[in-house]
Amino acid sequence: MRELSLDDLSREHARFDQTALATPEIDAFCSSTAWIVSAHQAFTPGRQPFVFETEDGYLAFMRSRDPRGWDVLEPLESSWLLATPLIGPDPDRLFNRLAASVPAQVAMVCLSG
C-alpha cells in the first residue's frame, strides 16, 4: 500500500476517478476527486488524510477526533456521505485491506456510499 497526501490524490485524480468508474454500484461522480476533495476542503478541512493506493484500488478516508475524544476514520466527503471511501472493482477486498490497516487507536470507521 502506498500512502497518499491530498496533494498526491489531486495530482493523480485521473487514475483515481477512472478507478471510481470501475467501482460497482456507487455514484461515481460523488466518489470522484472533484466531489470528495472539494467537499473536504469546504466543510471539514482540519482532518488528517488516511488515503492509500493499493493493488486493489484506493482507501479514501480522513482521520479525525470526535467530541468524545475517539479517533475516527471517515470518508473524505463526510457531510452528505454520498461517496464511497472504497474505490475499486472489488469492494470486499478493499474492505479486508482496510480492516487489516486500521490503526489500533481508531475507535470507529464510518463507511458510506
Image (cartoon, rainbow, N blue to C red):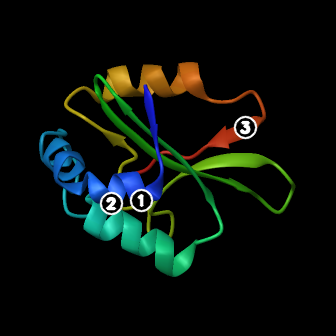
**Residue where numbered disc 2 is placed:** 10
Q: Nearer the viewer, residue 46 or 112?
A: 46
Point out residue 76 in the picture as x, y percentages from the top left corner. 47, 58
Label 1 neighbour load within 10 Å: few <14, some 14-19, many 20+: few
Q: Nearer the viewer, residue 26 or 36?
A: 36
Point out residue 86 in the picture as x, y percentages from the top left corner. 36, 39
Query: What label does residue 7 carry, if any?
Result: 1
Q: Residue at x 39, y 66 (%)?
A: 37
Q: Are marks 3 and 2 in contact (CB under 8 Å)?
A: no
State the separation of the CA atoms marked 3 and 2: 25 Å
Q: Is residue 55 left or right of residue 68?
A: left
**Residue where numbered disc 3 is placed:** 106
Residue 24 lies, with reference to residue 12, above or below; the image says: above
Amino acid type of the residue that numbered disc 2 sits on in the rendered structure: Ser
Q: Are marks 2 and 1 in contact (CB under 8 Å)?
A: yes
Q: Nearer the viewer, residue 35 or 52?
A: 52
Residue 35 lies, with reference to residue 43, above or below; the image says: above
Amino acid type of the residue that numbered disc 1 sits on in the rendered structure: Asp
Point out residue 103 in the picture as x, y percentages from the top left corner. 69, 30
State the separation of the CA atoms marked 2 and 1: 5 Å
